[in-house]
Image (tube, rainbow, N blue to C red):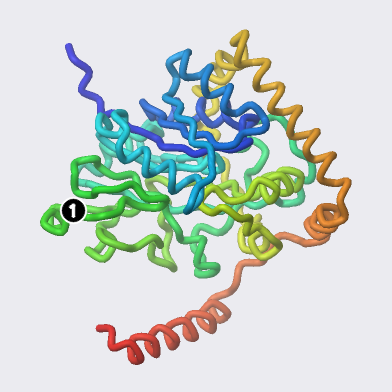
Amino acid sequence: MPNTDPRVLAVLTLRDEGAFLIDWLAHHRAAGFTDFLVFSNDCRDGTDAMLDRLQAMGWLTHVRNDGPHEKGPQWSALAHADRHPLTAKADWILVLDIDEYVNVHAGDRTVQALLAALPAATAIPLTWRLFGNCGVRDYQDRPVPQQFTRAAPAVMGWPWRAAMFKTLFRNDGSYGKLGVHRPRQPDRARMAEQRWFDGSGRPLRPAFHTGRVFSDYGQDNYRLAQLNHYALGAMESYLLKCDRGRANRETSAFDMSYWTERNFCSEEDRTILALADRTAPLRAELRADAVLGPLHAAAVAWRHARLESLLGEEVWRGLYGRLMMTPPARPLDTAEHEILASHALRTRAETKRDTGED
């Protein structure tokens, strides 16, 4: 009988992140993703060679996307993905970064279980849960979800990035283009058919169908699924992240403000480790490959060598020192959040008044 399970595609953009690739792929295959469309650009650590080997092994489709890029490598990659045959074949699509791990709580913890829990859904925004550094200094070659297990509270109002999401959406033609956080170019004639649900299974209002990138604040958006966001990693990895730059911009924008607004260690969350028994054999299979295994080891060695090179410069030693001196961020209490929110609402109202917006 033909396979009737939905094809679920993850679209990924990489540069110099080969050391994390095997663990990320093993987790997301265990979580139910059937296809991976991966773009690489300007790699120095052999990520592109790893992707070539993984394509030969049947694990993914690799597209080289070397620069220069007018709007950044990720936007360039998404423009290519819009036209790629694998995108056309997908039933559901999610655009991800390698520091994001899908964490489904429904059923057997697969994407298929999430879709079964929300059968009417045409899109499910997966809200970030920010996992902090929590004092981890050294980069280690081990699965990120095992190393970082403390995160921001399930309910918080600031910073606003804590409520950002990535959208798992049905690829039915309702949207014309992929976006970093959500599908773009909506077909207005089809928006009445849209049924968006948040990660706790609540129906979302029509404003989400066309433009929102933040979940509603002040509530738990994680009951059925969340997106674990390991934006910082170890302090050493953060230095390398700053060196690499952002995927959706040509220039780097990482500094202590980026660190502080993501370094939350308030609550322990090990729920993603429920997939560890399914992930481990997949990871072992990939590492045992005679070609891929040495490429992985070379990517790990590259990280250590690059770090040594960076720390030969005062600007990087200075940043490293500030990371070590800065404690985890304290979530704002309700009163503090209301102060910031009131100013934001006032500014928004003034802007609407001055521009004549409805």
Q: Nearer the viewer, residue 83 or 127?
A: 83
Whether 341 is drawn above or below 34: the answer is below
* Residue at (61% x, 58% y) in the render: 262
The spot of residue 341 in percent (x, y) is 48, 80
Q: Residue furthest top?
A: 290
* Residue at (61% x, 49% y) in the render: 268
Q: Quadrant of the N terminus?
A: top left
Whether 344 is drawn above or below 353: the answer is above
Q: Nearer the viewer, residue 295 or 169?
A: 295
Task: Tell me the SS state at disc 1.
Answer: loop
Q: Quadrant of the C terminus?
A: bottom left
In the visual, does 328 lie left or right of 261? right
Q: Nearer the viewer, residue 202 or 125?
A: 125
Identity, as a three-letter code, of the amino acid under mark 1: Gln
In the visual, does 2 lie left or right of 34? left
Tally the marks: 1
Quarter of the view holding residue 91: top left
The spot of residue 333 in percent (x, y) is 58, 74
| Residue 199 showing in the rendered view | no
* Residue at (79% x, 40% y) in the render: 307
Residue corresponding to mark 1 = 194
Mark 1 is surrounded, within 10 Å at the Cα level, by few (under 14), some (14 to 19) or many (20 or more) other residues, namely some
Quarter of the view holding residue 355: bottom left
The spot of residue 294 in percent (x, y) is 68, 16
Whether 296 is drawn above or below 178: the answer is above
The spot of residue 285 in percent (x, y) is 56, 13
Q: Nearer the viewer, residue 230 or 303?
A: 303
| Residue 227 showing in the rendered view | yes
* Residue at (57% x, 52% y) in the render: 250
